[in-house]
Amino acid sequence: MAVFIRSTLLVAAMLSLAACGQSPGCRAVTGGALGAAGGAALGAIGGNPGLGAAAGGLAGAATGAFTSPNQVSAGPSPICY
């Protein structure tokens, strides 16, 4: 149960930073972090959280890097300038 609570808090924290920022690099980092967290959660259900995290992180980073703030934006990032 503690793992579930920790995972839920981690995903909630990453959702607050998902795909934010104005530069492609910052958007790639935040998108990759969110994708890795989501991928690990789904991978754990399927039995391989490492592979899920890798696939989710890659997909999230690519989405963040190759989209503009006008396409997907959660506002300015609190950590990237």
Image (spheres, rainbow, N blue to C red):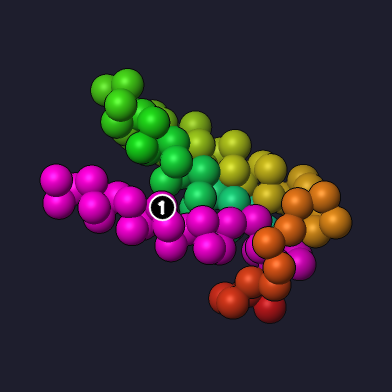
Which image quadrant is residue 68 in? bottom right
Q: Position of residue 58 (x, y in %)?
A: 56, 39
Q: Is residue 38 left or right of residue 67?
A: left
Query: Is residue 14 shown in magenta?
Result: yes
Please state the horizontal and vertical placement of residue 52, each as a whole percent of the image: 41, 31
The residue singled out by tag 1 in the image is 11
Residue 54 seen anywhere in this rendered image of the structure: no
- Indicate the position of residue 2 as horizontal and vertical percent values: 15, 51
Q: Nearer the viewer, residue 58 or 39?
A: 39
* Residue at x-position 42% and y-position 46%: 37
- In the image, residue 23 above or below residue 19: below
Give the quarter of the image for residue 43.
Answer: top left
Given residues 23 and 6, the one toward you in this image is 6
> Can you see residue 56?
yes
**29 left or right, relative to 11:** right
Residue at 36% of width from left, 57% of height from top?
Answer: 10
Magenta range is: 1-26
Magenta stretch holds residue 22: yes
At 59% from the left and 43% from the top, the residue drawn is: 60
Q: Which residue extends farthest left?
A: 1
Q: Quadrant of the C terminus?
A: bottom right
Residue in the picture at 69% in, 43% down: 63
Instruction: Report which quarter residue 23 is drawn in.
Output: bottom right
**28 in relation to 78, above or below:** above
| Rendering coords of residue 3 (x, y %) | 19, 48
Give left or right: position of 52 versus 1.
Answer: right
Q: Which secondary structure dominates the residues rendered in magenta? A: helix
SS label for mark 1: helix
For badge 1, the amino acid type reads Val
